[in-house]
Image (spheres, rainbow, N blue to C red):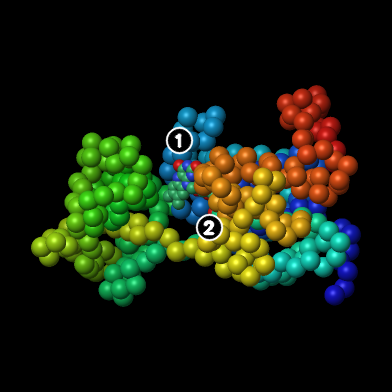
Amino acid sequence: MAQPRPEDIYDVTIIGGGPTGLFAAYYAGFRTLRTKIIDSMPDLGGQITALYPEKNIFDVAGFPKILGKELVKNLVQQAKQYDPTICLDEKVLALEDVGEKLIRLGTDKGEHFTKVVIITAGIGMFTPRKYNKPQIDSYEGRGLHYFVKELEPFRGKNILIIGGGDSALDWALNLEPIAGKITLIHRRDGFRAHEDSVRQLFRSRAKVKLFYELKELNGDGFVKEAVIFHNKNNQVEKLEVDAVIACLGFISNLGPIAEWGLDLEEDSIIVNSKMETNRPGVYAAGDISTYPGKVKLIVTGFGEAATAVNNAAKYINPKASVFPGHSSTLLDKSGEVKVSV
Ligand code: FAD
């Protein structure tokens, strides 16, 4: 293998530009590390951008309530202060050691060289679970949605939401103020959602029908009718609808990451308290990482990103301190950072 030119070697390469990866990029910039983010999606923001940009998030410290897309906008702005290189629509397929503190990442578009890798790949490559029934799936993009990117197109519409998890309930609650009629069907009577969302759902004007499932969709090019059935007595009912949102969960898999020789527990990468994996120079943080007591939340990802980057800074330069100092005291009057590794 030809040796990469020094200018092609980054200090830190972050795989995954979700909230954890974006905050890691900010932090790496703050530590004056030359940083690159690679993400397989066309936009930054990970699960938030792909699955719930228009939903409010209530458990990010310092924000009593923030729209998903607003949080991503702020994270991107924060990360871009240090001008990281951003490669989108690019899937990382291979990770190999090619020298002392030198890692090569192979992608579907080329290769990248880096001293340290921080894997913030979330739930890996994820796709919504679909019906896999041609009669129903043929309406995808024609009134049948598996996730929602914008609320406005649903204004005034009669909407059927299917599912009993957080996604289904969140969409029901978020769309309730603007929808025409809104019905939620669920195949059981138990919900896998926040207790508070369940309470709010039953107080909302959404009509909730338990033990119902979707049988078929009808329309003339665009969905107009949903045929649902009661799964205990097979009673069939027809609903006039303009839109159906099926929240059947997601199928995710680590994809190529599972082949990189990392210690795994189910679909998560095992890390220690420095967020190190079993491979030198390879760290993991956010949803993809696990350790005893792990909680998969945006805020835990932020803390883990800071831990990973600060320990990576010391790995790159053993004379550097793990503790970065405080951002509030390390900025001089011009806004420049006085910390160095
Ligand atoms: P992700 O957001 O999953 O980002 C990972 C990125 O890595 C993705 O963009 C993916 O494309 C990329 N990637 C994966 N593999 C590769 C590869 N091989 N090459 C290149 N790129 C790759 N959490 C909360 O704290 N509060 C909430 O209210 C909340 N609500 C939620 C609502 C819904 C509907 C869902 C689905 C999740 C919710 N979560 C919530 C969970 C939260 O979104 C995740 O904890 C968070 O997104 C994890 O961030 P991450 O950066 O670790 O991973």
Amino acid type of the residue tagged 2 in the rendering: Ile
Image position of 248 with respect to 27: above or below? below
Residue 184 screen position, x and y as percent: 25, 51
Disc 1: which residue: 58
Element carrying mark 2: loop
Residue 178 to residue 159: above or below: above
> Cα distance, mark 2 to mark 1?
21 Å
CB at mark 2 closer than 8 A to ligand 1?
yes
Amino acid found under the numbered disc labelled 1: Phe
Mark in front: 2 vs 1: 2
Relative depth, front residue between 272 and 57 = 272
**Mark 1 near ligand 1 (CB under 8 Å)?**
yes
Question: Which residue is painted at 47% across and 29% down in the image?
Answer: 64
Q: Which residue appears at 37% of the width and 66% of the height?
A: 130
Give the residue pinned by disc 2.
123
Towards the viewer: 91 or 283: 283
- Cβ–Cβ below 8 Å for labels 2 and 1? no
Residue 261 on image: x %, y %: 67, 67
Would residue 32 be seen by someone viewing this image from the given angle?
yes
Q: Specify whether 332 is left or right of 304.
A: right
Q: Nearer the viewer, residue 269 or 328?
A: 269
Which residue is pictured at 57% across the width and 41% down the height?
A: 300
Helix, strand or loop for disc 1: loop
The label on residue 117 is none
Around disc 2, counting alpha carbons within 10 Å, would you say few (fewer than 14), some (14 to 19), or many (20 or more)? many
Q: Residue at x 76, y 52 (%)?
A: 12
Image quadrant holding the N terminus, namely: bottom right
Name the residue furthest front: 292
| Image spot of residue 103 (x, y percent) | 78, 63
Relative vertical location of residue 304 with respect to residue 116 in this rendering, above or below: above
